[in-house]
Image (cartoon, rainbow, N blue to C red):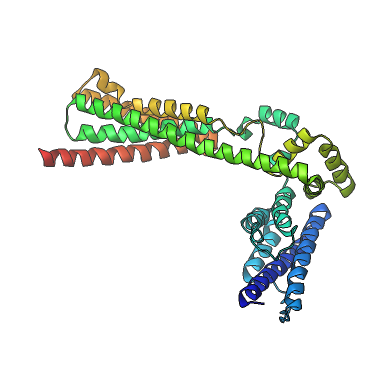
Amino acid sequence: MTSDKTRRYLRYLDAERASARMYRVLATLTDGERREALLELASIEDRHAAHWMALLHSAGEVIPADPGELSADDEAVVARARQMGLSAVLGDLERAEREGAGMYDAEPDALPAMSADEREHAEILAGLSVGPTSVPADARAVLNKAEPWHRTDKSGALRAAIFGVSDGLVSNTALVMGFAGSGVGGGTVLFAGLAGLLAGAFSMAAGEYVSVASQTDLFRRELAIEARELQEKPEEEQRELELLYRAKGLDAQTARTTAAKIMADPETALDTLAREELGLDPDDLGDPKRVAASSFAAFAVGAAVPVIPYVFLTGTAALTLAVTLAVLALIVVGGTVGRLSGLGVVRSALRQVLVGGGAAAITYVLGRLVGTGLG
């Protein structure tokens, strides 16, 4: 065996042993289905470790003893779980599993099922914390009606609209203030403001379109892969569903019955796997055209605020009105963001005014300096 293979096998062995130790220790901190799920994860890691030990042994390599102790980093995770509960560390564990999910994809000596096992671990950990996708659709509808602050905007249109207005308002106010500070005529300020409005709106729309279109393409690819796996490996997909439902608190028999019933209908199975395993809503993957149009309109609305006074006025009157409208708009936009985000209307509005007003003030001063130097 080459030294490169030896190093790879030893690295895999260390990783599998460490994961198994971690899951077993965490299992002692909980009970019921959560405990069973963690112990099952540990058992899978043990099987992987046994595979690498067998390869090392057949090549005449010395197999290092299992230290049996957690690393310093793993000890810190366990300490946090003891102090704050298992749920406090599940997100970190899930992310770690997702980051390492492809470790065997290019490894020719790995067993065929090992890559699938590693990817499945992240889904099981995600299922240990009951998420919004586990709530039935009718229950989510009732919850959204009763508590509107829990609603999400999967298409991205609302987010794009709010932040489009904010970006347009702040950037174009700063641009207009910079030109106004330089002492140029009102016509030049108006032209600069309109140019900034159009350039920014088109840039914002193009960026959002590409972003959401790429995200939607990725989601569709994930769904296509899931559909293919459902067709080619229905038993494995049913086992994944069963494990996810067990991790969410169902007993083994109920989880098995539920998974079998779902898998009986291919369309329902794909929809359920998309929601439970991928966290996707197949009916709402995002609309890039809608988001782009929303972004364009929102940026233009925000950017128009400091420009409008220069359509009708010039000089100090136009500048004063532009500043007044910009401040009022910053308060409204900031308050709206605070209302939707839960940050607080007053706090968010104040932050928006300070940031946006600060940017405008700085560009006004710079424009003043440049205008004075040119004069």
For residue 203, which quarter of the picture? top left
Q: With 80 as the anchor, is 188 left or right in this view? A: left
- Please count the marks in the image: 0
Image side of residue 45 versus residue 314, left or right: right
Residue at coordinates 42% horizontally, 40% vertically from top-left? 351
Q: Residue at x 52, y 27 (%)?
A: 290
Locate the C terminus and report the quarter of the image it occupies: top left
Who is closer to the viewer here, 90 or 14?
A: 14
- Horizontally, is 325 left or right of 4 in the view? left
Q: Position of residue 66 (x, y in %)?
A: 73, 76
Position of residue 74 measured from the top left corner of the image (x, y, whole percent): 66, 66
Q: Residue furthest top?
A: 312
Tell me what residue is drawn at x 72 percent, y 54 percent.
116
Q: Is residue 279 visible?
A: no
Res. 311 in view: yes
Residue reaching furthest to the left: 375
Q: Residue furthest right?
A: 253
Quadrant showing the N terminus: bottom right
- Give percent across and percent down for residue 110: 71, 64
